[in-house]
Image (cartoon, rainbow, N blue to C red):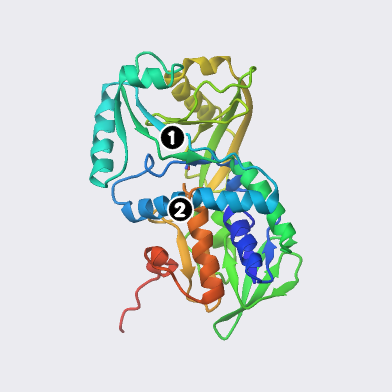
Amino acid sequence: MIVVGGGVIGLGIAWRAAGAGVHVVVVDPQPGRGSSWAAAGMLAPVTEVHYGEVPLLRLNIASLQRYGAFVGDLEAASDVAVGYRRCGTLLVARDRDDDAALAETLAFQQRLGLSVTRLRAREVQELEPALVPSVRSGILIEGDHQVDNRSVVAALTAACLKGGVVFEKHSAVRVEADQGAVSGVRLSDGRVVPAGQVVIAAGARSSEIAGAADLPVRPVKGQLLHLRTRDGRAPVTRNVRGLDVYMVPRPDGRLVVGATVEEQGFDATVTAGAVHDLLRAAYELVPGISEMELVEIAVGHRPGTPDNAPLLGPTSIQGLIAATGHYRNGISLLPVTVDAIVGLLTTGEVVDEIIPFSPLRFSPVEQPL
Ligand code: GLY
């Protein structure tokens, strides 16, 4: 079996499939250095919920419920700690307009039966004293978590190597097929690696691979900042979100500030405007960030789809399986994606959870002549 793409989704599938006795080859010129590396690692589906995305929210919640067990297994298999923390998220209203938006968000979340708590300004301030004193209100989502996504990459890579996964550090150029069934993958060096099952987990690059069922994935650029305190203590203790910025504190004192959402193709330029906008939005919530060191500006390309939801399951080509298009949710959807795709690979069954996310939902309907 071949997994095209060595981000967290591809590596996770490779690790678990190898553990189930499957011979696995991962094809990626730079495993773990795409959007999995750029991500912030915030596991906060409840705060990212949007109207009309309820099935996606349910999938995210199902994934979050499995996170503890997933990272427990991963840390045991790899000997790499992944910084999984049940830290919660504080959604903050800075002014009257934000406050009205938060009230709507809260009502929507409560209608869905989600566990969220509305907080007054004083309560918000008590929870996170570094927040600007003029904060008007907040919503606390205690169920949100975070993980250090770069450590997850390291852990999955180590677990794959220990499990006998083979890495081909080349680009996948084409999925080869014979009479409608997958027969292998052609690499950028011209070789063809044979396989009867191929998983496309190439994130934003998934639509560039010839013969891969024309998966409707496009790159959505994100720029993020990494700030650091000198004393190794981040100014906030939990994920903090304003309406236009999020901050994810790491135990080593880093604060990841994100993120832009830009339709710029694969452009990877760091722009002054993005840095300015992110710093300004973060500063307006946590003024103390102005004292922090700016240590890194990360750029990634989210795999966006027409409805912001992933492409999971069989495609129109026999043996070709999609595990891509996770857009803003690649880190949080990791356990549920891995379970579903490895189950499909080993038993042939499509679990109910992923039926709404079939890649075939975008196929053009054949019209009678
Ligand atoms: N999920 C965070 C982001 O896409 O920026």
Furthest residue in direction bottom, as rendered: 179
Q: Quadrant of the N terminus?
A: bottom right
Residue 88 numbered tag = 1
Structural distance between the alpha carbons of marks 2 and 1: 16 Å
Residue 63 numbered tag = 2
> In this picture, is 113 found above or below 172?
above
In this picture, residue 326 sits left or right of residue 120: right
Residue 361 in the image: state x and y as whole percent: 38, 67
Q: Amino acid at mark 2?
A: Ser
In this picture, residue 332 sits left or right of residue 90: right
> In this picture, is 83 found above or below 294?
below
Residue at image location 50% in from the left, 59% down from the top: 337
Packing grade of label 2 (10 A; few <14, some 14-19, many >=20) is many
Residue 118 in the image: state x and y as whole percent: 28, 29
Residue 257 in the image: state x and y as whole percent: 52, 30
Kindly tell me whether mark 2's CB lies below 8 Å from ligand 1.
Answer: no
Residue at image location 26% in from the left, 22% down from the top: 96
Residue at image location 60% in from the left, 71% down from the top: 198
Contact between labelled residues 1 and 2, with CB atoms less than 8 Å apart? no
Q: Secondary structure at mark 2?
A: helix
Residue 23 in the image: state x and y as whole percent: 69, 71
Packing grade of label 1 (10 A; few <14, some 14-19, many >=20) is many
Q: Secondary structure at mark 1?
A: loop
